[in-house]
Amino acid sequence: MCSLSLNTKVKDTRDLLCNLAHNWDAKYNIPFTENDDKHKCLIFGIPTSKTDFITGHSVQTGDHWYPIGQKRKAENKIGSDSEWNIIPVSGSNKKENKYNQLKRDIFNKKDIDDGYKEYSDKIKQWISYVESRGAKLCYNVPDEFHQVIEARNNEMMILQDKYFTNLCSITPID
């Protein structure tokens, strides 16, 4: 048996939600300006927003503070895909690194270790700045949203099964 279910990727909504967040950002979020980028650098103490605020190394994109889809079902929210929601940290983070531990602790409302306090303060300062500008880190989604996602998943699975059955009927060439 294959290690992946036939519908594993069909049910993966990350790309769909990322594109939706990008669309909603264009419609409903405050534009991120050059001045906002300067404030981000000032708050995080970095020369450019492409610098990891913990290690000082160069970064490609950073990390979505509020996840695009990870909290969709539990909190009825999807993260913004804008620069407002991007924390300047390296994408090569490992689970045991400071930022990931800090993010878990903040989201789980745990006490922040003294060694992480300066980083926590910068993130909180950034979030305050974002809120003061009226920008969004995430979007609340109505029940209808989940119904549409579920209907999409069901239709995609039917389509996937149809084409899989068609492919199974084809005899490979020797």
Image (cartoon, rainbow, N blue to C red):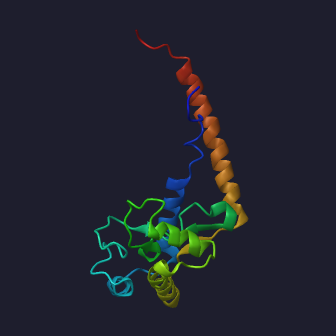
For the residue pair 163 and 139, the one nearer the viewer reads as 139
Task: Name the side, left or right, on which 159 lies relative to 88.
Answer: right
Q: Return the residue found at the far front.
A: 114
Residue 60 position (above or below residue 168): below
Q: Position of residue 54 (x, y in %)?
A: 37, 74
Task: Name the side, left or right, on which 136 lies relative to 173.
Answer: right
Residue depicted at 51% across the width and 84% down the height: 124
Residue 137 position (above or below residue 143): below
Q: Is residue 151 shown to the viewer in this render?
A: yes
Q: Is residue 81 shown to the viewer in this render?
A: no
Residue 117 position (above or below residue 141): below
Please state, as top left, top right, bottom left or bottom right, where the N terminus lies in the image.
top right
* Count of labels in the image: 0
Q: Quadrant of residue 76?
A: bottom right
Please state, as top left, top right, bottom left or bottom right, where the C terminus lies in the image.
top left
Residue 78 position (above or below residue 156): below
For the residue pair 109 and 156, the one nearer the viewer reads as 109
Q: Position of residue 127 (x, y in %)?
A: 50, 83
Q: Position of residue 28 (x, y in %)?
A: 52, 76
Residue depicted at 29% across the width and 69% down the height: 57
Q: Position of residue 161 (x, y in %)?
A: 62, 31
Q: Return the residue found at the far top.
A: 174
Q: Quadrant of residue 86?
A: bottom left
For the residue pair 1 and 131, the one nearer the viewer reads as 1
